[in-house]
Image: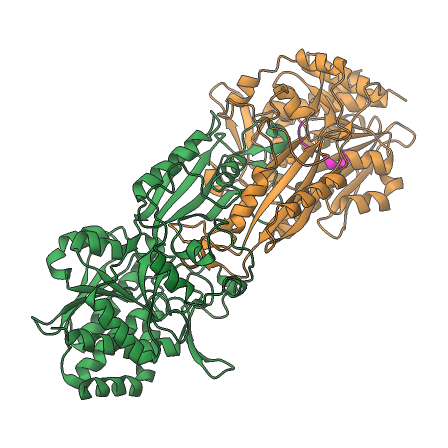
Chain colours: A green, B orange
Amino acid sequence: MPSLDSVLACLDLNIDRSVARLMELLRIPSISTDPAYAGHCRSAAEWLAKDLSAIGFEAAVRPTPGHPMVVAHDGPEGAPHVLFYGHYDVQPVVPLELWEDDPFDPKLKEMPDGTKRLTGRGTADDKGQLMTFIEAARAYKAETGGLPCRVTVLLEGEEESGSPSLNPFLDANKGELKADIALVCDTNMWDGETPAISTGLRGLVGEEVTIHAANQDLHSGYFGGAAANPIRVLSKILAALHDDNGRVTLPGFYDGVQELPEEVKKIWDGLGFDPAAFLGSVGLSVPAGEKDRAVLEQLWSRPTAEINGIFGGYTGEGFKTVIPAEAFAKVSFRLVAGQDPDKIRAAFRAFVEERLPADCTASFSPHGGSPAIQLPFDSPYLDTARAALSTEWEKPAVMIAMGGSIPVVGEFKSRLGMESLLIGFGLGDDRIHSPNEKYELKSFHKGQRSWARVLDAIGRMR
Amino acid sequence: MPSLDSVLACLDLNIDRSVARLMELLRIPSISTDPAYAGHCRSAAEWLAKDLSAIGFEAAVRPTPGHPMVVAHDGPEGAPHVLFYGHYDVQPVVPLELWEDDPFDPKLKEMPDGTKRLTGRGTADDKGQLMTFIEAARAYKAETGGLPCRVTVLLEGEEESGSPSLNPFLDANKGELKADIALVCDTNMWDGETPAISTGLRGLVGEEVTIHAANQDLHSGYFGGAAANPIRVLSKILAALHDDNGRVTLPGFYDGVQELPEEVKKIWDGLGFDPAAFLGSVGLSVPAGEKDRAVLEQLWSRPTAEINGIFGGYTGEGFKTVIPAEAFAKVSFRLVAGQDPDKIRAAFRAFVEERLPADCTASFSPHGGSPAIQLPFDSPYLDTARAALSTEWEKPAVMIAMGGSIPVVGEFKSRLGMESLLIGFGLGDDRIHSPNEKYELKSFHKGQRSWARVLDAIGRMR
């Protein structure tokens, strides 16, 4: 495979230029969840379409009711067809004061151990990851004049904000987007040396719930004792979401949840996962999930209820003896195979309503809702990709599950009848969604090489 | 009493000018809890010292480690000596968007029923109230050339932020401030027609508690299920503060709390208090306190635990699937006679610590701490003031209790050995501490006349 060798050499030779390109993209603050950044989201989409066009893709920014999609096509007709998916939007950057540098002024930093990393919002999630694929395609084209298989690229701008425009877009462009297999680059390696393909992904249901009590903020001196306090009502409800064993108490929550198959359990046991080290890495020591489950199960194969945000009353400097008119929380549920997002949402709403005092009301605002997915273990693409990854990293690629949800994977399956290969080069300490997000230069570089190998191998499957 | 008559006539004649003076003071945004407003607090103190000097008081702005005090003296030596107390600082004004007008651009508005009211932050709490006394003193001096008794004025600038400088100031100036009786104008009438003297006041203990979990914000996809969520920990703790009957569950919380004497219960029963109307006025219907207590007891004679603020995680637009590193709440306890603020604070801290998972910690920040007070019913000043108020309002003044705390009253008693007469002209719908605070012009005007009568009557007690 001399052509692959030259592609890999080209990637090695051009690593500095690929870093510079990524940094350009990282400087665009494409925060999708905040409407104030809509213009920047559009700029990121335009930057990507331009870059893909420069490589030779037929690329376009495609409008949606929200942030646009980028769609691009290239490669020989008749060859195996892959759909590459990534997202160009990023998470918000609060609390800003915890960042060592401006989150949108990316840096390439050398660590004391000599390794290098890219820092800034989106380095790992997902701009750095998606650019590994684009760089692989660029080098392939540059060295061989074409791509080894048919490639469609789909880059979303709403992944971090519930993907409201995704489903209509998939439905409206089914014929154009349907491929033999989807390649999704938004996941982690097992560790810094071990490549991984994620074959299971938890789903997600998000709900914002607001408890309304009095029709105005009250002074606790005048009303305290007699007036309903919505923070107290909300706390009671949230506290009731878990029992003392860490189990979620929503009626019907575990309906349809399957026990882990023995063979999978065996693979996971063999991973050498160290719960103490995992929790210790973030300053924790006590597993917070169901007490009778191993930590890897708590993370990968068991559903959860999580409070992601809460607010009510006076939270500024000093003190204000107020009983607020309302209080809200953002709650999310990680789902596993067998759970229906709609049923979970309805169960949560009923759970809240049942616990309201007669003079309080609740309002709800949904955020996303996707079932968990489980990929078949006998897919020929899975074998092909595992082999390619194992060659690049000189270590067998492992099949793992993911605690996070990537809703698009479920939608590819249900709407386009297409399975997904989840191959990513992030690491557990990349601080995605947190201040000081980073992406290892090794991830970026060997990620590019990995994609070159995977594309090359899939091209040979015809 | 021709001199009193002319003083009252003078107050009637000058009501427009007194409103204009009050508005000047209201325009100074003297928010004490926010350090950014320290300069404005100082300006308010200077304005008051200047105004008192103009009347003829020997007045000065007196420094403290925080916002300054205003102290002024006037009136004949040897006459009965009163210490008038008020505070020139005001509550914060968030949420600003709920105000009909700029909170610091006061207005005099005519209502559809022909009554007039002053609107803006501080109109009722406490600038409008304290100016009733100053206007009475001004008219007395103008009409008679002097005051009927010795008057010391003490105006504080930290009442809304826990009064950190009050106690050292009282201790350092004991000889100067100790009088025969304190007159405090920071309370309400019973209703718009019925003057009231508050003989019982609940105390207050405030605590800000922060729960610390992981050493960084975490992504709930990667860590959800296994990592401690400080919002969940906090919610569990806050939810446990009350049992299902509305009783506070802190161990020892009710130690020393006395049952209401039968005679007081009788007075309160005779007030014609309507719990449904009281709660209905703010859109509520279900008393939230101890189930076996009347609402007036819940408000006046029973201690409470209240959550005044809560914050954690992502609370902006959209959603962020974060498990935050920490979450905090501002909690306050209203105390009644017999409860020790220090013991309650310690009990709360122990309550929190006992409920922490092993890998979480809590930090605490105290805010204020004052015991409840109960004034003796046989004070001659109480009789004198009741008679004066009853004459002005042509309706017997009632003795009531207050749900709110006025820490200074307890300190006057313990540090200066001085009882306080709590006479105020606020109304329950004045929206103090809330958007659109107001003060009835009738309160402002008849409040001035009331003080003229009270001063005159106390002057005759020699």
Q: Nearer the viewer, residue A196 or B48?
A: A196
Location of residue B121 by image quarter: top right
Q: Nearer the viewer, residue B283 or B228?
A: B228
Q: Is residue A444 above or below residue B358?
A: below
Residue B11 appears in the figure: no
Q: Residue furthest front?
A: A262
Residue A175: % across, % down: 10, 58
Which image quarter holds the C terminus of chain B? top right
Q: Nearer the viewer, residue B65 or A270?
A: A270
Residue A268: % across, % down: 39, 63
Residue B145 appears in the figure: yes
Which image quarter holds the N terminus of chain B? top right
- Taking the spot 37% from the left edge, 67% from the top edge, the residue there is A188
Q: Is residue B76 above or below residue A27?
A: above
- Taking the spot 66% from the left edge, 50% from the top edge, the residue there is B364
Residue B63: % across, % down: 76, 51
Q: Is residue B329 above or below residue A193?
A: above
Residue interval drawn in magenta: B403-409
Location of residue A2 by image quarter: bottom left
Q: Is residue B416 left or right of residue A408?
A: right
Q: Is residue A228 left or right of residue B378?
A: left
B138 magenta-colored:
no
B405 magenta-colored:
yes
Q: Is residue B347 left or right of residue A444?
A: right
Q: Residue furthest left?
A: A78
Residue A52: % across, % down: 20, 73
Q: How many marks?
A: 0
- Taking the spot 42% from the left edge, 77% from the top edge, the residue there is A117
